Image (spheres, rainbow, N blue to C red):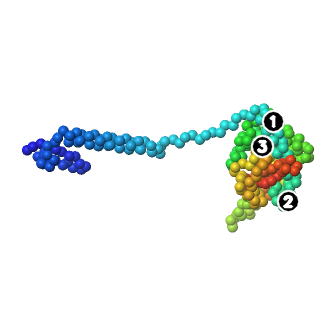
Amino acid sequence: MGATKTYHRIGRTLVIPSELIAAQIGPLLCKDLCGMINIRRLTTATLGCTALFVVAGCKSIPGSEEPSPPPRVYSPRPASPEEEITLIHADSEVFAAVVRAQLRAGTDEYPFRIDELRYDPRPYGTRSGYPEWSAGVEGAAPELYFARAGQSAIGQIAENRKQILQMRKVPEGSPFNYPQCAGVMVPPPPPPPRGSTSTARAKRQNVHAGCPKKPESYVTVGLPLRGQPEGLKKIRDSRGELVDLNGDVWTTLVDEYLAGPSGWSHTQHAWVFKRSRWTGRLELAATIQTGIVE
């Protein structure tokens, strides 16, 4: 029996006698052999390229175990002496505008009149002069507008605020702490179940027993923010109107802490000021509530 040619296929092997091949295509010529070699080379090259594409494609798919890039950490730079002077002047003007607007407040709409009004002269009411936690408002970080001031500059800001309060005859205030006083919205505990003894009824806790007998308050004012932060644009203010101001605009965060016989509350508003074309002073243009805890 003559020689045979073997073709390998997926799943089986097909054997064809060489005589049958010669009868079908005749003797192989040199050009035919060259053509077959070229076709075989082309097929081999095509398969090789396909394998490379498959491997490259597999490598381009990110694995689920690959670690995500670390988040960018914002590190504020220290302010230069010239920048600190600019911040001090801007803070004095904005703080004076806050006190002036608060003293004009009534009882119909926010800002409301505060009878026991006291101001903490320190920015944000903190030792560092910077907020201890984020306000939750995009663009409200003071370092986005002014480089971080040193403690000497923060001390000068507090001294200037004290002078403004003295000129307006407004007393200073410091934080108060009533750990046994619940918020004004905290309900009293439910009554004891039926059948309980009179002693259990007498021990029913009063959540406002540790509150002050007279109303107390203190207000903190943040550092000035130039313009209107992005998180406060095109949203409704305390009057229900959309706020989108242009021109010479300044914003600051005002926190009000109130305590009385019925409990305590903490509210935060962004006060937005715009410079008047007629008086040249900053006038309160809008207030936006940014937080409340009761």
Q: Residues within 10 Å of mark 3 (few under 14, many from 20)?
A: many
In the rendered view of the protein, which quadrant contains the N terminus?
Answer: top left
Q: Earlier in the sequence, mark 2 or mark 1?
A: 1
Type of the residue with mark 1: Ile
234 is higher (above) or lower (below) than 52: below
In the displayed structure, does residue 7 sit left or right of residue 70? left
> Quadrant of residue 198 in the image?
bottom right
Q: Earlier in the sequence, mark 1 or mark 3?
A: 1
Query: Residue pushed farthest left?
Result: 1
Type of the residue with mark 3: Leu
Q: Residues within 10 Å of mark 2 (few under 14, many from 20)?
A: few
Determine whether the residue tagged by mark 3 lies in a helix, strand or loop.
Answer: loop
Residue underneath mark 3: 223
Determine whether the residue tagged by mark 1 lies in a helix, strand or loop.
Answer: helix
Rendered location of residue 43, percent (x, y): 29, 43
> Quadrant of residue 174 in the image?
top right
Is 158 or 200 nearer to us in this picture? 158
Is 57 or 122 nearer to us in this picture? 57
**On residue 85, which mark appears?**
1
Between disc 2 and disc 1, the foreground one is 1
151 is higher (above) or lower (below) than 270: above
Determine whether the residue tagged by mark 2 lies in a helix, strand or loop.
Answer: loop
**On residue 107, which mark appears?**
2
Is 74 or 283 nearer to us in this picture? 283
Between disc 3 and disc 2, the foreground one is 3
Type of the residue with mark 2: Thr
